[in-house]
Image (cartoon, grey):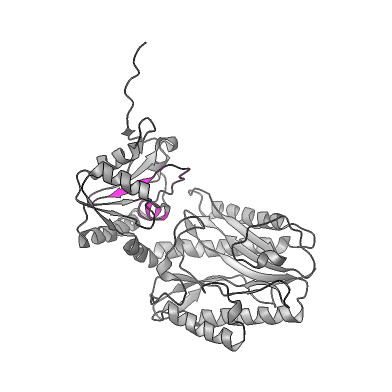
Amino acid sequence: MTDLPERPRYFSLRNGDRAALPFSQSEYDLRLKRLRAIMARHDLDAVLLTSMHNIAYYSGFLYCSFGRSFGCIVTMETCTTVSANIDAGQPWRRSHGDNIIYTDWHRDNFWRAVQSIAGSVRRIGIEGDHMTLSAKTALEDAFGAITLFDVAPETMRARMIKSAEEIALIRAGARIADLGGAAIRDAICEGVREIDVAIAGRDQMELAIAEAFPEAEYRDSWVWFQSGLNTDGAHNPVTARRLEAGDIMSLNTFPMISGYYTALERTLFLGEPDAASRKVWDINVATHELGLSLIRPGISCASICEELNRFLKQEGMLQYRSFGYGHSFGMLSHYYGREAGLELREDIDTVLEPGMVVSMEPMLTIPQGMAGAGGYREHDIVVVGETGAEDITGFPFGPEHNIIAA
């Protein structure tokens, strides 16, 4: 029997022409320049990025893991994504910089590919909040005696300040979220299922994204449309429950554009709400309006929370507040990424700066069995400027706009 030829552990495949990336080449060059400044500050020979958000942020390539390892090795001279053979040439087409493919033929080929790019290194940056213990062991086995340094906190801080190109994309996402919200509002009627309403919103957003970004890849846009008891949690999945007259409803649209998340969230009622429900809704709307007025450069996340907590305590509703009042936007999703240093919570002292983009999204949850039971939530996206802030969400909120005739 003839011996099979030795199959490669890794190789390059430049298949087809380069695709248009979400941002300009100069944008990615600037991001890499800032990353290399972090490397220089900590005397790092290379950085190995492994998370979806950081690989996409620095290279433009958003991977689909499906249980496989992916990476991006940044040195002072190069930026190279490392992808699995199952994806063929697509990662190269959508990477800023180079790409190398590892094969399945031998164990630890991913780490051999990483080593072939990084070379002999003494100190390497990793994402400590993403790298598993088994991956850390494999990295140390591949490179031998090296020092690991966690770059995750500093890369997160770098992502918190958005460029003009990022803000333009986020604005487009906010507009498309509004379109999805309008489609949802039009689909609401007594007897329709939550899932059918959600589909109407998602389809509208995906078509709008394809029209506005004809060269993008389309994935991950979704809707949470909740009703009745199902409104009590902000992230409760869609069900097949049929809408009933008098229902409280929660509209949540999430268009995803090249890994960038935007959102619209609104409380609605199917028919006139009872007096207790109207009172809770009015208080949450007032909290939302106060929160929007507080967002500006120079104020800390914790200070915003203190003011909103004081208001809700005065109204006798603080005990029904569900979570933080807002968070950052950018390269994130419900299953990857988060800029935890820019959340409107009591334990976050970050001071808002121009270029930051945050939500204002107060939520009150009244338990079942109490008057006004349900989850009440409003959500807008706000861009922090040099002297103030701009609300880029256009969909109206409050009882004057979102009571749907039963």
The picture places residue 88, in percent across and down from the top left corner, at 42, 35
Q: Nearer the viewer, residue 391 or 287?
A: 287
Which image quadrant is residue 402 in? bottom right
Tell me: residue 287, above or below residue 168.
Answer: below
Quadrant of the frame with the C terminus = bottom right
- Report whether residue 103 is seen: yes
Which image quadrant is residue 180 in? bottom right
Instruction: Inspect the magenta stretch and tell me whether residue 6 lies in it.
Output: no
Quadrant of the frame with the N terminus = top left
- Report whether residue 97 is seen: no
Give the left or right position of residue 223, taking residue 340 as reference: right
Q: Magenta segment, which residues?
A: 53-78
- The number of callouts visible is 0
The picture places residue 188, in percent across and down from the top left corner, at 73, 62
Give the left or right position of residue 388, taking residue 399 as reference: left
The picture places residue 142, in percent across and down from the top left corner, at 27, 42
Residue at 57% in and 86% down? 313
Which image quadrant is residue 186 in? bottom right
Residue at 28% in and 61% down? 34
The picture places residue 184, in percent across and down from the top left corner, at 68, 61
Residue at 62% in and 55% down? 202
Give the left or right position of residue 345, taking residue 372 as reference: left
Tell me: residue 216, above or below residue 312.
Answer: above
Residue furthest bottom as drawn? 314
Instruction: Inspect the magenta stretch and tell me whether residue 74 lies in it.
Output: yes
Give the left or right position of residue 63, taking residue 182 as reference: left
